[in-house]
Amino acid sequence: MGYYTSITETDIFLDKKHFDAVYKKMCELNDYDDLKSGGSFGANNDPKEGERYNSTKWFAWMEYNYPEIYPDMKSILIALGFDLDFDIDGNLVGLGYYDKTGAEDYFLQCFAGYVNDGNYIQWKGEEDNDYYQYTFENGKMFYRKGLMSVSYDEYEPEEYVFGQMSSSDLAAAEWTKKWKAEREAQALESLKELELDNN
């Protein structure tokens, strides 16, 4: 299973002189295990001895040690499922995507500060009214939810901060924490009832 999403429109320009800087940021992302949705639930979050990266946590569709596998920004974007368009000078001028959603937002956030102000990437999810957009302004990336009219100005934009979880991932983590606490309370209550029955 998974939720499919696709890029419907882009206005993007990333000068080739910034490719290495963006690649470096994409590799640095691998140090932030809290952002990763793949891996063993409840597993040890520390890298094994002798490993640079934590082999129990990874970004969706990526290997846990992707910085050791992919030598540049282009290869990381392709591994994530993007199609890339370049101009005659080799600058990145377009992106395509039609695949299950994963961690593409965190990797795109690495463009912030390197692409032109006002650049954007528009998306459409599986649901009829699921439109959203990433915009780049003043060295930051923002998420805007769209309406059926495909307007991105109806909602307050959410800033992505490098190395920090998005609000949707924070909400999911909070829900998981609450769910685990409720299950533990239920298990404790069941244990008490069992002890009473045995006495």
Image (cartoon, grey):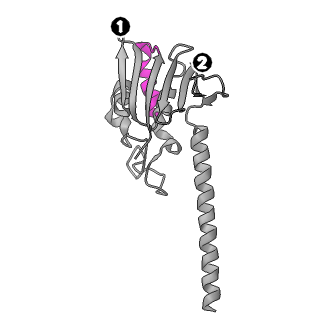
Return the x and y of residue 186 as percentages of the image width and height.
62, 70
Q: Give the secondary structure at mark 2.
A: strand
Mark 2 surroundings within 10 Å by alpha-carbon count, few (fewer than 14), some (14 through 19), many (20 or more): some
- Foreground residue, 75 or 177? 177
Residue located beneath label 1 in the image: 89
Mark 1 surroundings within 10 Å by alpha-carbon count, few (fewer than 14), some (14 through 19), many (20 or more): few
In the rendered image of this protein, does residue 188 appear above or below residue 75?
below
Identify the disc placed on residue 137.
2
Report the magenta stretch's main SS.
Answer: helix
In the image, the segment drawn in magenta is 12-28
In the rendered image of this protein, does residue 12 appear above or below residue 79?
above
**Residue type indicated by callout 2:** Glu
Is 184 included in the stretch rendered in magenta? no
Q: Quadrant of residue 74?
A: top left
Split into 4 quadrants, where in the image is the C terminus?
A: bottom right
Q: Quadrant of residue 3?
A: top left
Position of 114 compared to 56: left or right?
Answer: right
Position of 51 compared to 128: left or right?
Answer: left
**Residue type indicated by callout 1:** Asp
Name the residue furthest top. 88
